Structures are given as structure tokens and as C-alpha cells.
Image: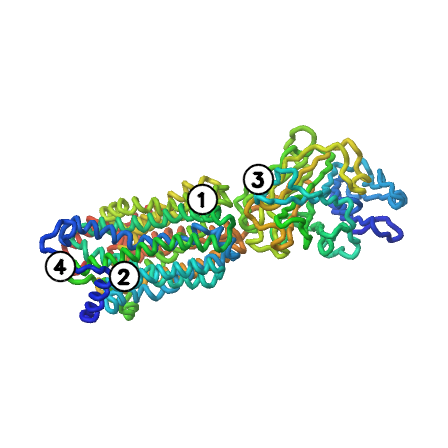
Amino acid sequence: MAGLEEEDYLITEGDSLSGHDNNARARTMPAICDPSHLLHRIVVLVFMCFLGFGSYFCYDNPAALQTQVMQDMQVNTSGFMQLYAWYSWPNVVLCFLGGFLLDRVFGIRLGTIIFGSFVFVGQIIFASGALAGYFWLMEAGRFVFGIGGESLAVAQNTYAVNWFKGKELNLVFGLQLSMARLGSTVNMNIMGWVYDHIKDFMDSAGHTTLGISLMIAASTCLFSLMCAVMLGYLDRRAERILNKEAGKTGEVIKLTDVKDFPLQLWLIFLICVSYYVAIFPFIGLGQVFFIEKFDFSPAQARAVNSIVYIISAPASPVLGFIVDKTGKNVLWVACAIVATLGAHMMLAFSFWNPWIAMCLMGVAYSLLACALWPMVAFVVPEHQLGTAYGFMQSIQNLGLALIAMAAGSILDNKGYLILEVFFCACICMALIAAVMLYFVDLLRGGELNLSSSARARLLKNDSPHSE
Amino acid sequence: MELNPGLKTPSTGVGLVHVRAVGSNDTLHFLFCSQGAPALILVHTNSSFSYVHIDWDAVLAGNFSGSLKVLPESSVQFSSAVVLTRLWEYDDVNDTGDPQDPFSFFPPYELQDFSWNDLNTTIDLAKLSATLCGRNNSNTFRNGSLCLAFSAFGSKGRDAIWPGLLHNANSSKLRIWLDDVLPRSNQSRFALELQTVSSAKQRDHVDVLKSIDDEYTPSIFKVSQWVSSPGNESSEILGYTQWKPVAYRSAQPKFEDATPCRHSNPVLLSQLPPSGWVKAFFEDGLQMSALNLTFSIAGDPFYNTTNYLSWSVLVGLGVPPQDSFSPLVMTIMAVGLGTPLALILFGGVFACIFKRGQQPQGYEPIN
């Protein structure tokens, strides 16, 4: 339906970008060029994984360079946290629109390239702001970056489904997630080093040094943009050769569905918001916290701050497997929340080595992601899934934007203890929601907390109805 | 609180503020004074009727020695003094924040040579405070000054302004700031020399205590205290000097104005600090020590970015006050942890009643 103009657009786009003459290719081709062959899919997978690398790498640039940003741009912590808030604002809306834009307006290939360009241009603006010494320009850059960031992740998933559905899809999702975490981790650990080298080279620190470092970080976005172009080309080529369709996100967003959302779903939203706001803004501010409270060196602080992401990369598939096998999602969610609460309390009320708390948080964070997100599918019918997920991400971003600002000003005025207590309060909120979810589900006879065997039984008895 | 106790005719240049804190069976005397280097003298007596006696004739004649007494002398339990003697300035060319190279130091400002403002006009009886500002006649202090604000306290509390040290009626506070002084280089950093006299044994090291509570001094998780105990390594504490290792680069401190401060190890001195009133009260032969406080570290902005530096220290008698969690923290944690627990309990009971026999024990593992 979206067909004709989209196809035309893409053909010119693809040709002008690739510059190859595809028609002249011989009919018999080696495995690596054959779209139906595994080897070719692996090549595609590589591009797919690096598609999101740039945006994940640059998302946490501010966290990796917190002291430098605050000193070079002369902003306080609330100003600094605005960089995260500005990233989240566009996504409050785009979580609904992203899928629509990809399916109906741009198409997956062009859409990916467009979102990739937003990410790249946003990072360039961000870096230019630093280079020129204008903090508002940096904020504007983060806003543009945010427009591309989350939607690019949707595009990445769509590509994955399109190429690997019914094959190695779960593995691919896992790999993409690991890649995202890898991007964050590499960023956390390398940006300070890059900055120091530029500083030595320039012989002085200042906003120019910061700008150059961020420009270097922008190269990852350029790289990801090139991956987007390559993917677009390969996808179009595969379409012509295999006569398959361009991928769709399949997301249908109907805002009127919202009124039909059951109480359980709202509780899941509440858990999602109040849990994630105690993780991401905390990691954004973590590096300096570890330096100031635990006397860590900057390098150690960066390492411990990125451990959550590092753990999440290998732990997600394993924990996902465990949750799948056992069911009882609500219980797992509650466990994850309690563990995170414990980790935050350790950081707040003790001088214990933060590696313990952060590792615990890393495991809990992965566990929560594995157990929480699939629950949505149990409580809403399939045709409302897109809306439900869109809504969930949207309010998550809203929460992140607001809490990032709040966290910055709490830290500026009240210090780390109160900030940590505030995060604990958020986690307690999530815990309350989880407990309520358990009871609501119990009373309404829902299937959220059934073990997987009970779910299988239910599925057998009542196959057309259940998800 | 009184100025120049016992002085009949007002006279300039001999300012001494006396604060008496009377307890049921003891009295604390705080004397803040500026003859020579600015000093704060603390005396603990075990009588509620002890008083300060000054031989003003001798003082006005310039003969300080022995002219300040707290009577009856037998009631004096413990006495100590803190004197600000020097302001160091060094040229931190390599931005190390660590003045190792003796050649990087400019000649220090000797605070005994400063001319100090009259205390009279700055006394605030309601707030129990007085401010002393001084300068020398060099060019660098043309617009600038080094000021000390002394406060005593009637009850437990803390300042609204950072570092918000916790104080009680047994303590007094000095806030010291260096405003608008022309630094002698573009990379100037400052350090302060503190000398002390104590009638008891003052520890040969400053204890740095960790505190998880940074609510009143954001991002500072340490408290430094330097205490005096009677004689041998007794754990009893008679007096203390306590501070947070932070200085601020503006008069209205904000988070980003904080700059760390470090202290050297105390060294023993052989003569009394150059303060007239300290010499008037103390005799030679007591324990005298000195330490330096260095402000800011490598990478922090130099003095000339704001031309302001302030640091606060609590000087008191008895055991130093200790921070504890604020009611805010307690309330949030109690509500935060209590609500889910209560929900689990009530929810569990509720669910048991309504779903008797179905899944009665299902709620337990959540906890």
C-alpha cells in the first residue's frame, strides 16, 4: 500500500548511494552474495549490529565525560542532566510515531538512513556546541540526536525480524542487545582517555578539547550511518533477487486502545517508569559519585560505572532463558526490584566496595528487562501490542526526562545521599507496583505469574484465545 | 557575649570578644581576638561562676604577658587556642595543586602584621557572631581582605550555608574567607597556616572520618578532626578542631564552587603563636603545634577565576558533634520500605481470605 512511491524513492536512493550496476550481476553467485544463504545473512547481521553502535556509543558520551563537560562548559549538575532530558523529550512522542514513520512514510530502508542521519547530525551539532562553547547548542544537538536514537532501534529490530524470522531471530536479538551494551561500555571506558590525549595534544583543557573529543565520537555515528546505507542496499538487492517484501515494524498504534488497557498493564507501566528512572540517570551521574564517595580513580570509576552494561550483555540471554523456562514473571520482576533496591541501599548507606552493588544491579537490571517486557504480551491482545509497547516506551522516556532534571538539581542542592535515597524511593515505588500487580493478577486470575508449565497447559486447553 | 570585658574607656586595636556559655556546673569561655594574628581561645572551667579578668592597664601599655586570666584559676579544666598565622600563596605553574616546590611560594602574608578592623561594629548579639576583616598595606590587598567570622551557638543546629557544619552549644565556628585579593600570579593557589596551643595533649595527626551522609555538604563524604586528649593516649576528648575537607569559591556556595582542601600533618612548635591575647593567657611549655591547609587540587580553577575562597572550621570543647541521618532520609526510607511490606502482609491476608485453598502461600517468596 505504501508501495509505489516508497519503492521508487528507494531505488533511486539505493542506486545513487551504492553506485553499482546490480543488473549486470551473474545469476550464479558465491554464497556470501546469495541473500538466501546463511553466510550472506551473517554479513547482513554484522551491518545490523553496527547500525545501533554509534547511537549507543554516543548516548552515554555525557556520562563518560561528566567532569569535563561540567568544567569546560561551566554548567552545574542540573544543567548537565539536561543533556539527558533533551534526549528523552522527542522520544515521548516518537515512540508512537517511529513505527508509523517507518512503515507508512519512509519505508524501512530510507527510514533507517534518515534516523541514522539524525543521530549523526545530532552528534555533530552536539560536538559543535562544545567546540563553539555554546551549551544551548549542545542541548539542541542532543534533541536532534534523540529524534534518531530510539527510532533507529525500532528500525534495527524490524530489519532483524525481516531477515531472521523463523531462523536465528532470538540469537540475533540477543546479539544486537549485546552490541548495544558493548557500545555503551566502550564509550564509558574510552572517552575519558580520548579526551586526555586531545588535552595533551592541545596542551590545554577547554571546550575546544571537549568538542574535538565529541567530534571523534561522532565518527561512530558516521560509521553506523554507512551501515544503514549498506543495509538498505543489501535489503533492496535481496528483495529483487528473492522477491520478498520490505520489512515492516507491524506496529499499529491506536491511541484509543489506551482506554481498554487493563489495570495490570498500568501497573507494568508504573514498574517500568519507576525502575528505569533509578538506573539510567544514576549511571549518567555515577562516574563522579564513585570518585567522590569511594575515592576511585577516574578510570576505575568509569569501569565500575559501565559494569551494569557489561554484565547485561552476557546475562540477558541466560536470564531470558531462565525466565522463559520457569515463568512466574511477576516474581522475577519483584526479585529484580528487591536486588536493585539492595544495591542502591548499599551505595547509599555503606562504604562497601561499589563493585558488589553495581554487579548486583547489573544482574538485576538484566533480569528485570527479561521478565518485565514480555509481560505486556500476556495482558493485552495482540493487536494492541504495538500501542502498549509504544506507550510504555513513551512514558518511560517522559519519566527519564523529568527524573534526569530532578536528579541533577537534587544533587546540586542536597548531595549524593539524598539522591540515592530518592532513587531508593523510586525503586520502592516499583516494588509497590510489583506487589500490587501480583495481587491484582492473583485476584483477576491472570496468567502473569503462572509457571511456564501451567501456561503451557492453559495454552493447550484454550489455544485460540491465549497469546 | 561582650566586647573587651572590664575595659572602662573604649580603645581601638585591642578588640576581644568574649562569649560565656554557662552550664549547670561548668562554664565555657570563648575569646575571639585580633591582637597580632587573629585567634580563638577556648577555656573550660568546672565552676558556673568563673569569669574573665583582664589587666587592661598592662594590656594598653603593650605588656600582654599574664594579663588575661580566667578566674578562679583552679577551676580551669582545659584551655586551647587556634591562631591563624600565615596565608601562603604559591604559583601552581604545572597545575598540580600540591605545593612541593619551595620556590613556587611567594613570601607569605604574616597575619600578625595585618591591620584588623574594629570588632565593635560587627558584633551581632542576637546571632552571637562577630566578624574580623584585615589587610596589609600591600598592593594586593588594596580592594581585598581576609575575613574571619566567629559564631558561638546557644543550641544544636547547623548553618544554612555550606559546608553546614553541625554545631552545638559547646562549639564555635570560624568561617574564613579571602575576598578580592589580587593574586600574585595567574596560577595562584592559597594555603593557610594554623597554629594551636593546648593545655592537654593534642594528637599528632588529624583524623579523617568517613561519613556516608553528605546531605549538608554535597559530595563531601569526609570529616577531618584534630582532637586533644588528657595526657597519654586516652580516648577521652577534651577539645577539637573539626572541618570538612572542602572550601568554596564563592560567597553563596553552589555545588560547582566546591574545591577540596587538604591538611598537612601537625608539627610541634617551640614558641607561642604570635597573638597578643594568646601570649597573655598561655604560658610557654604547653603543647603547641601547627599545620597547613592547602586549598584546591590539580585541575581545579585557580583563585583568579572567582577571586574568592572560603573555608569553615568548628572549634569546640568536649566531644565533636557527629552527623546522623536527617528525618527526611529516615522518613523516605521508612515509608519506602514500609509500604511494600505492609502491602505484602495485608494483600496476603486479603488474598488468603478470598482465595482460600487456592494459592494461600503464594505471597511469601516475594519478600
- State if disc 4 and disc 2 touch (CB < 8 Å): no
Marks 4 and 3 sit apart, C-alpha to C-alpha, by 77 Å
Verify CB contact (< 8 Å) between mark 4 and mark 1.
no
Query: Which residue appears at 79% of the width and 50% of the height?
Result: B115
Of all chains, the one bearing label 1 is A
For the residues marked 1 and 2, what is the alpha-carbon distance in whole angstroms? 35 Å
Mark on residue A301? 1
Residue A65, position as x, y percentages in the image: 45, 51
Q: Which residue is mark 4?
A: A24
> Alpha-carbon distance for marks 2 and 4?
27 Å
Q: Which label sits in the foreground, 1 or 2?
A: 2
C-alpha distance separating marks 2 and 3: 55 Å
Which residue shows up at 78% across the image and 53% down it? B117
Mark 4 vs mark 1: in front: 4
- The residue closer to the viewer here, A323 or A320, is A320
Q: Quadrant of residue A381?
A: bottom left
Q: Which residue is mark 2?
A: A112
